[in-house]
């Protein structure tokens, strides 16, 4: 892989460059480039490998529970996602979901909940999932209908969740359901639901363009002990948003990894492909494209690591994370498309690296808040600041 001088940027501490170098070497040795036919088995295997390699320690918080540190080091999870995405999209997915799926427990769980789940997540013994979206509540999360009704020392869950990554292979799911303390976003709570709990079923497996385990979940009179609730009743929306605040910046980092890989592939191809008596890279039109790609990647990287660094300073990153996610995912799509174009017919051949990247990047512009949702967040923050100044 090309230029790594960005690791010298002031956003990073010395340990971050070491982490990137070690993971890069580990990934080159341990994770295959190709997509496996059995995506469930491939994903389980990757979680196990990432656990054995010690990388999942970064995905959780709390040294007593097997984490690298007391909090989640945002720059570390970004570098890990970027590096894994450069090697293998499914490895990035496996890492990210261990973090996102257990993030609510890391951030808001009781000591008993942390003890029961986090060490297993860090070792790769338990696979995690994050179940927020519903058929009628995607971008508009607060419209969720899946309900949890208190019944003595239990809650009874009824309803559906969809687009749930790791659905079908997860050992536990952090599920958000309406508990009705107040209308809308203030009447939602978070629960840990173990796979195999009676009344909980995988209703449908969903196939997507870059295959990974994905499912629709159904709850039918599913009884969950009240001790499985994460945080206060009615605070589930905050639990979800604070979890997403940590991991949204890491989606930008994954996009960055895909984009860097595409640029590497494009450079290698353009310099060796001969046409009209010279190399493809000798043409100024190709050079303009390469310049655009490299500049877009650096701009996205600056926004990504600015947001990660700012969060690690303990500051709010709502606006910065949205800017990073929007810019990195949209830029990566353009970079990958430009790389594919340079490959000509080879670019659309199944399982060629650029063909895979072209499929891998697409969903990142949609999940954890589509680009349009990020635009709304950025504008809301800007207008709030402007209105406060006026008063
Ligand atoms: C591969 C994949 C994995 C996923 N994994 C998970 C998971 O693990 N857990 C989970 O809970 N969810 C997951 N999701 C769901 C994801 O978060 C939702 O798909 C996303 O929030 C969008 O919701 P939706 O699909 O219902 O689209 P909709 O909400 O119907 O939005 C459709 C489109 O409308 C546009 N739009 C949205 N808001 C506005 C607006 N205000 N103004 C103008 N245009 C707008 C956007 O372009 C958006 O893409 C996953 C999705 C995918 C594709």
Image (cartoon, rainbow, N blue to C red):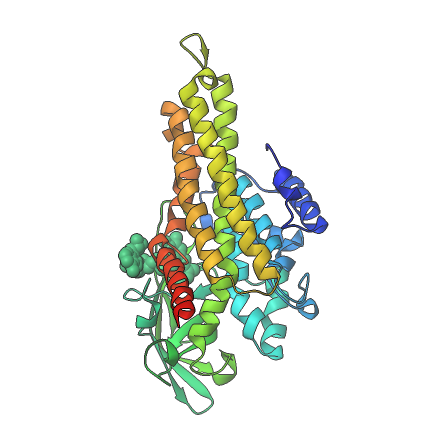
Image quarter for ligand 1 equals bottom left
Q: Is residue 163 visible?
A: no
Q: Residue furthest front?
A: 390
Determine which quarter of the picture holds residue 384: bottom left
**What is the x, y in percent for residue 324?**
47, 51
Nearer to us in this view, 93 or 368: 368
Q: Name above or below for residue 243 compared with residue 181.
A: above
- Residue 306: x and y in percent read 55, 52
Q: Quadrant of the C terminus?
A: bottom left
Q: Is residue 93 above or below residue 385?
A: above
Q: Which image quadrant is residue 199 in?
A: bottom left
**Nearer-the-camera pick, 265 or 355:** 265
Can the viewer see residue 105 in this picture? yes
Residue 244 location (% of width, % of height)? 47, 63
Q: Residue at x 66, y 53 (%)?
A: 52
Q: In this image, 203 relative to 328: left or right?
A: left
User: What is the tally of numbered marks visible in this picture?
Assistant: 0
Q: Residue at x 37, y 23 (%)?
A: 344
Quadrant containing the N terminus is top right
Q: Residue furthest bottom?
A: 152
Residue 227 drawn above or below residue 39: below
| Near-viewer residue (2 or 376) | 376
Residue 249 to residue 345: above or below: below
Residue at the far left: name it: 136
Q: Position of residue 15 (x, y in %)?
A: 71, 50
């Amino acid at each position: 892989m090309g230029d790594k001088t960005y690791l010298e940027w002031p956003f990073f501490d010395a340990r971050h460059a070491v982490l990137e170098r070690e993971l890069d070497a580990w990934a080159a040795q341990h994770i295959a480039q190709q997509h496996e036919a059995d995506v469930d088995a491939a994903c389980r295997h990757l979680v196990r490998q990432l656990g054995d390699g010690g990388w999942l320690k970064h995905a959780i918080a709390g040294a007593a529970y097997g984490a690298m540190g007391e909090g989640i080091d945002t720059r570390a999870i970004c570098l890990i996602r970027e590096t894994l995405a450069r090697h293998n999209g499914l490895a990035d997915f496996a890492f990210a979901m261990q973090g996102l799926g257990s993030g609510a427990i890391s951030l808001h769980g009781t000591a008993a909940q942390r003890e029961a789940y986090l060490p297993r997540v860090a070792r790769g013994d338990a696979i995690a999932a994050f179940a927020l979206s519903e058929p009628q509540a995607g971008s508009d999360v607060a419209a969720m209908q899946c309900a949890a009704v208190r019944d003595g020392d239990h809650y009874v869950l009824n309803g559906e969740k969809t687009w749930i990554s790791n659905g079908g292979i997860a050992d536990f799911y952090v599920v958000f359901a309406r508990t009705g303390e107040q209308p809308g976003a203030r009447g939602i709570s978070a629960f840990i639901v173990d796979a195999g709990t009676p009344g909980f079923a995988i209703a449908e497996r969903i196939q997507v363009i870059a295959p990974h385990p994905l499912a629709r979940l159904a709850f039918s009179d599913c009884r969950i002990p009240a001790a499985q609730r994460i945080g206060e009743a009615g605070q589930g929306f905050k639990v979800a948003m604070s979890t997403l605040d940590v991991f949204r910046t890491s989606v930008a980092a994954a996009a960055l990894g895909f984009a860097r890989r595409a640029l590497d592939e494009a450079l290698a191809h353009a310099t060796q492909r001969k046409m009209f008596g010279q190399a493809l890279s000798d043409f100024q039109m190709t050079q303009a494209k390469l310049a655009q790609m490299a500049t877009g990647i650096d701009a996205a990287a600056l926004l990504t690591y600015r947001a990660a660094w700012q969060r690690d300073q303990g500051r709010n990153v709502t606006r910065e994370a949205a800017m990073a996610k929007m810019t990195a995912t949209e830029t990566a799509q353009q970079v990958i498309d430009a790389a594919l174009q340079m490959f000509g017919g080879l670019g659309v051949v199944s399982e060629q690296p650029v063909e895979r990247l072209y499929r891998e990047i697409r969903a990142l512009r949609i999940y954890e808040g589509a680009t349009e949702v990020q635009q709304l967040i950025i504008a809301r923050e800007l207008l709030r600041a402007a209105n406060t100044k006026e008063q």
